[in-house]
Image (cartoon, rainbow, N blue to C red):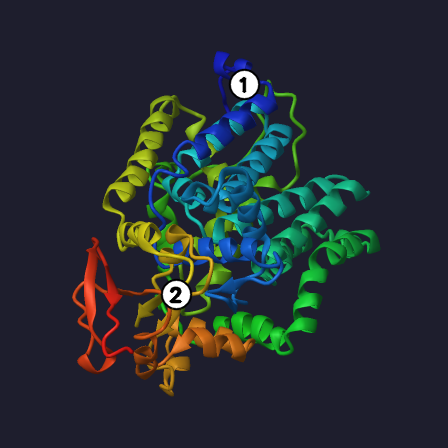
Amino acid sequence: MNTHSTTSLSRRLNNPALVLLLLALWLLATLGVRPLLLPDEGRYGNVAREMLLGDGLVPTLNGLPFFHKPPLMYWLDMTAFQVFGVSAFAARFGAFVGAWFMGASLFLALRRWVGLRLALIALGILATCPFFYVGSQYANLDMLVAGMLTVAVLCFVRALELPKIDLAWLVAGWLACALAMLAKGLIGFVLPALVLGPWLLAQGRWRQIIGMLHPLGLLAFGLVAAPWFLWMQQRFPGFYDYFFIEQHFRRFAQATFNNVHPFWFYIAVLPLLTLPWSLYLRSQLQPSPDAQAQPLKGLTSLMVWWVLAIVGFFSLPSSKLVGYILPALAPWCALLAVTVARGRAWRWLIPTSAALCVAVVLGLACKAPGSHRDVAEELARVQQADDHVVFINEAFYDVPFYAHLRQPAIVLSTWSDADISQHDNWRKEFADAARFDTAQAAKVLWTPDRLATLRCSPGTTWLVAEKNYSLPAELGTASPVFTGANAQLLRLEKTGCP
């Protein structure tokens, strides 16, 4: 590969610590400028907030055990809440951590294998890629697990550079797998195996595959990953079946979940979400002639297979979300960097793409689609300690977060419906959570006929409902208090009370 000599910019950025600090500042710059998006950000942000109010171990959704995902992101967000207060900025801290680790590990690995200049360009592409930047600003688990998976793969590859395995890097890889499992489950070690196993076999390095199963690495993985899962099963019998069987294998195999897309969905999505950089995909990774890099055999084939393995794996189930293929971004951007580095277009494409990233985030901040923050802030202003809060036939995930509710809301719906389990929505989430704490479920999951019992209860009963909702006469009389962009706040009147 023909490249220019190291540029003045590269010389100024020869300090890795400075590069990684700039990456962090870039990712943090707009982290808190927009309200939480629904449903994911409101749901996961409030689970972390409830864990902070609770024991810090059991994820809860409106007071009910919520076992869709493991706790790593919640733990990171809880830490941010304690430092920065409960805010959208802190709720996205887990996503920021995952994005930073993805960028940092890619930069440091490429700096070693192909030289500083190409590593800087690859990081610039990744950091200004809209898919990456928006993912780093979005409070769900996809970016966090993608970052840990990237670290895991690159640590393992570093451990396998020579025929004799570097045990320190091998253990680091297993620790990253453990964190990835605590971020999202079994893919924490399944995907690294899918990426590295065939790549090593294709090079005839099957002995290194066996060597990767070193007892010290497996012990490190088990000590970090296992305790939380063991503790949850002990406290909540049936946890293993729900978390591993239903949330992993059944969800992967069945077509009854939301977001059904054709097999080719990700093949189209990945290039589209990485424009304009995806226009440059052609060539192979090689070290710069003037860079004191340590070439890695099979680096190009690793990056190509890494992308194909992730995209192919997540193309198999019918349910597809764009965030699932975030683990393919690091190798994708590494491949793009090779062609980009041959010219000078990156000098203006990086700032242009960066401006696009910020524009997308600011656009979401202005529009705030579906947000109930205005209603929640009004509720926070008027509610008292002994008041009741009732959600009418909707989860309103962000209301407890912004209203700083210290007690779970009552959620009014037809919980006796037999088809709740057939629909992948908020009612199924609450109904699933009720399996693990039936006593708490009886306190917060109400059918509409129970609302009348609150008419004469101590304190005020506040109702949160959709904008056009009118309370049926048989349930009582409600007075409008505040109408927001997407919901309204009502007060249940005390009629007919002694």
Q: Looking at the image, which residue is at 44% across and 71% down?
A: 429
- Locate residue 117, reporting x and y percent: 53, 23
Q: Looking at the image, which residue is at 82% across and 52% down?
A: 216
Where 171 falls versus 31 (above or below)? Answer: below
Query: Which element carries disc 1, helix, strand or loop?
Result: loop
The type of residue carrying mark 2 is Phe
Left-right relation of 42 to 492: right
Q: Nearer the viewer, residue 286 or 377?
A: 377
- Locate residue 136, reporting x and y percent: 45, 42
Image quadrant assignment for residue 354: top left
Q: Nearer the viewer, mark 2 or mark 1?
A: 1
- Locate residue 52, reporting x and y percent: 55, 53
Q: Earlier in the sequence, mark 2 or mark 1?
A: 1
Image quadrant assignment for residue 288: top right
Q: Looking at the image, which residue is at 37% across and 77% down?
A: 423
Checking the image for residue 263, the label placed there is 2
Checking the image for residue 13, the label placed there is 1
Query: Which element carries disc 2, helix, strand or loop?
Result: loop
Where 368 falls versus 33 (above or below)? Answer: below
Q: Looking at the image, which residue is at 50% across and 23% down?
A: 2
Residue 141 appears in the picture as rendered: no
Q: Nearer the viewer, residue 87 or 336?
A: 87
Q: Nearer the viewer, residue 47 or 461?
A: 461
- Locate residue 89, reporting x and y percent: 43, 41
Disc 2: CA contacts within 10 A as few (<14), some (14-19) or many (>=20): some
The type of residue carrying mark 1 is Leu
Which part of the image, by quadrant, shows the C terminus? bottom left
Q: CA distance from mark 2 to mark 1?
A: 42 Å
